[in-house]
């Protein structure tokens, strides 16, 4: 069945109304007012006393005037300020009445939002100072194994999939090796991809950590790649996907670097650890203000003992 678009039935009057609304200064004011209110309410919520007063400070009003002047390019009118004040009071009244009615209790969305805001206010308050050379040396040495550089390998591969070729995949990979070994030039990955089957992995990997090889291709491929010497195309090597002709271009063993070689990584780890420790200390200071009571779990009901049926007597 064929479909075709019908004529545009929108009334020209609607376009005219939309155009006028977009150009209407009152609409601009309402939008600006909403933005001003949201930002101001977030930073400086209205003050209240025990009598239930809602106080809009002179500072609040001045900020409203300044923001309107910056956005509108002219001084704010008294009517505009009154409108913003009333909008802010209205929101505060609704907020307090909602709290009084208990609408914030047992509400996962409200709870998570408050937790998020508290974390924003208490975590990462100050950036830890950069460590001294002595501090960084001590941090790097305890234990230095955290910063060991893993074994890495640069290799390229041509893939022959069992899903497409079945039992022929291994033989096809082996048959491709003589032609690859005759090539003296380095083929770009796009050309390597054309020699085999599609695979959602790269045909060349540079300085890839050995653990990542296993993650990408499987443990069997990583074990098969490990003893291959640098130089000529070799294989076939099996992976979780099929069979591969492989050429190892460069290999480096796992080693322990000097601090100067990994200075930036060590300093970043040090600062992150200090930041986490500071965040935890602030949390523990807040937690100490509370007594935590955990009700005991209900006692497990005794397991009912099911009597074993007596064996039938012979002859019965």
Image: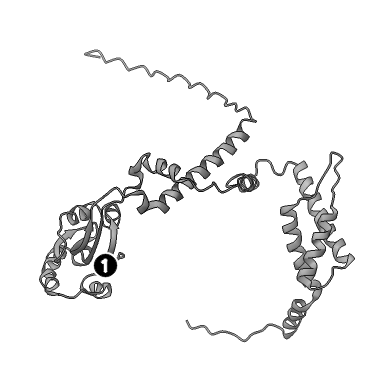
Q: Residue at x 74, y 78 (%)?
A: 18
| Image coords of residue 162 (percent x, y) | 20, 63
Look at mark 1 in the image and give the residue it sits on: 203
Give 182 or 274, whichever is nearer the viewer. 274
The residue depicted at 81 percent of the width and 47 percent of the height is 47
Residue 275 is left or right of residue 240, and the answer is right
| Front-lying residue, 247 or 176 | 247
Whole-percent x, y for residue 19 in the image: 74, 81
| Frontmost residue, 66 versus 287 | 66
Vertical position of residue 39 compared to residue 254: above or below: below
* Colour pattern: one colour
Kindly identify the residue that appears in the image at 26 percent across and 57 percent down.
217
Label 1 element class = loop
Query: Does 28 sit above or below residue 6?
Result: above
Q: Residues within 10 Å of mark 1 (few under 14, many from 20)?
A: many
Residue at (77, 65) in percent of width and height? 67
Count every numbered label the image shows and give the total. Answer: 1
Which quarter of the rendering shows the C terminus? Answer: top left
Residue 291: where, in percent of width, then height? 62, 27
Q: Quadrant of residue 20?
A: bottom right
Question: In the shown orientation, is residue 96 left or right of residue 159?
Answer: right
**Which residue extends farthest right?**
78
- Residue 313's place in the image compared with 288, above or below, is above
Q: Toward the viewer: 181 or 295?
A: 181
The quadrant holding residue 296 is: top right
């Amino acid at each position: 069945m064929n479909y075709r678009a019908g004529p545009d039935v929108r009334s020209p009057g609607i376009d005219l109304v939309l155009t006028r609304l977009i150009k209407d200064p009152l609409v601009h004011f309402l939008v600006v007012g909403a933005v001003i209110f949201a930002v101001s309410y977030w930073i400086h919520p209205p003050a209240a006393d025990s009598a239930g007063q809602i106080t809009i400070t002179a500072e609040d009003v001045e900020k409203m005037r300044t923001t309107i002047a910056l956005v509108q390019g002219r001084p704010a009118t008294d009517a505009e300020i009154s409108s913003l004040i009333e909008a802010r009071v209205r929101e505060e009244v609704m907020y307090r009445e909602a709290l009084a009615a208990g609408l914030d209790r047992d509400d996962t969305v409200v709870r998570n939002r408050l937790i998020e805001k508290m974390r924003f206010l208490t975590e990462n308050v100050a950036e830890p100072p950069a460590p001294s050379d002595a501090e960084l040396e001590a941090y790097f040495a305890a234990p230095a194994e955290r910063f060991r550089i893993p074994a890495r390998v640069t290799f390229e591969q041509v893939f022959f999939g069992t899903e497409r070729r079945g039992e022929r995949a291994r033989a096809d990979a082996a048959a491709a090796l003589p032609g690859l070994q005759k090539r003296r030039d380095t083929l770009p990955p796009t050309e390597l991809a054309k020699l085999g089957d599609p695979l959602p992995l790269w045909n060349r990997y540079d300085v890839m950590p050995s653990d990542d090889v296993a993650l990408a291709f499987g443990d069997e491929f990583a074990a098969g790649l490990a003893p291959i010497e640098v130089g000529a195309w070799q294989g076939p090597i099996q992976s979780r996907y099929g069979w591969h002709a492989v050429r190892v271009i460069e290999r480096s063993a796992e080693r322990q670097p000097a601090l100067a070689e990994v200075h930036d990584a060590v300093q970043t780890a040090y600062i992150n650890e200090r930041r986490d420790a500071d965040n935890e200390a602030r949390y523990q200071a807040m937690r100490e203000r509370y007594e935590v009571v955990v009700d005991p779990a209900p006692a497990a009901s005794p397991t009912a003992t099911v009597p074993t049926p007596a064996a039938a007597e012979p002859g019965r």
